[in-house]
Image (cartoon, grey):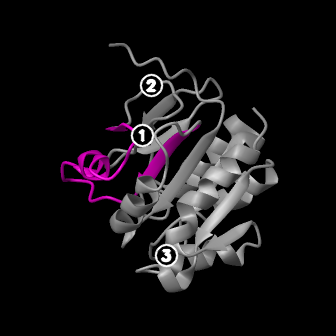
Amino acid sequence: MKDDRGAATRVVGVGASAGGIAALQEVLHGLPSDFPASVVVVLHLMPDHTSYLAEILSRTSALPVAQAEDGQSLERGRVYVAPPDHHLIVGTDGRLALEQSPPVRFLRPSIDLFLISLADSYDGRAVAVILSGAGGDGAQGVRRIKAAGGTVLAQEAGSAEHDGMPEAAAATGAVDSILPLAEIAEGIVAAVTAVNQ
């Protein structure tokens, strides 16, 4: 049976690193099966290992989860996961591109690079979410999302296994809501619902 969910008019970009898998599982578990946006996950992964992240996240998600492919169009109600050792970029045509351009601050995929492309392509229809992770990846990206009129959420440091990334995002002043992990999914639904179609 054909599953025609349609092109995504709103996109949620989720960045995570150390401690991020458990956080992602909880967030995706909280999103309803009729979620009206697409979700793109960028998690720092070991570059030289096969990733089973999509399969792991599928276990708790009511939405279909798959590893992102080059040239793929974003569809609402689906979750796309960045593959290892590739930057994931969103084009203005709503298509994903996988790039092996140089790492950004030793990271590939780079959450910053992804969020900047999301801001440029979806402006005020984008929602950025920063979950558990060490370091500061994502901070530059959330500034761009906010400047473009989008919404930014960050995990409360106390509920994160590693608080570096959420705290770096919060320090930018671009975060609209800092939420405990248990409330992130509800915050995403509210943010997406508030975005004009």
User: What is the number of the mark on residue 135?
Assistant: 3
Instruction: Please tell me in which quadrant of the rendered image residue 162 appears.
Output: bottom left
Give left or right: position of 82 versus 125: left
Q: Residue at x 31, y 58 (%)?
A: 45
Q: Residue at x 74, y 66 (%)?
A: 176
The relative height of residue 45 versus residue 148 in the rendered view (above or below) is below
Disc 1 packing (10 Å; few <14; some 14–19; many ≥20): many
State the residue position of label 2.
Answer: 72
Disc 3 packing (10 Å; few <14; some 14–19; many ≥20): some
User: Amino acid type of disc 1?
Assistant: Tyr
User: Amino acid type of disc 2?
Assistant: Gln
Instruction: Please tell me in which quadrant of the rendered image residue 81 appears.
Output: top left
Q: Say if the magenta span includes residue 172.
A: no
**Cβ–Cβ under 8 Å for marks 1 and 2:** yes
Q: Say if the magenta span includes residue 39.
A: yes
The relative height of residue 169 versus residue 122 in the rendered view (above or below) is below
**Cβ–Cβ under 8 Å for marks 1 and 3:** no
Give left or right: position of 64 versus 112: left
Q: Which element carries disc 1, helix, strand or loop?
A: strand
Give left or right: position of 54 versus 97: left
In magenta, the rendered stretch is 37-66
The span from disc 1 to disc 3 (Cα, nearest Å) is 23 Å
Quadrant (top left/top right/bottom left/bottom right) for the C terminus: top right
Q: Position of residue 40 (x, y in %)?
A: 49, 44
User: What is the number of the mark on residue 80?
Assistant: 1
In the displayed image of the protein, which residue is found farthest to the bottom?
158
Q: Which element carries disc 2, helix, strand or loop?
A: loop
Q: Residue at x 54, y 58 (%)?
A: 185
User: Amino acid type of disc 3?
Assistant: Gly
Query: Which of the two discs, 2 and 3, labels the residue nearer the N terminus?
Result: 2
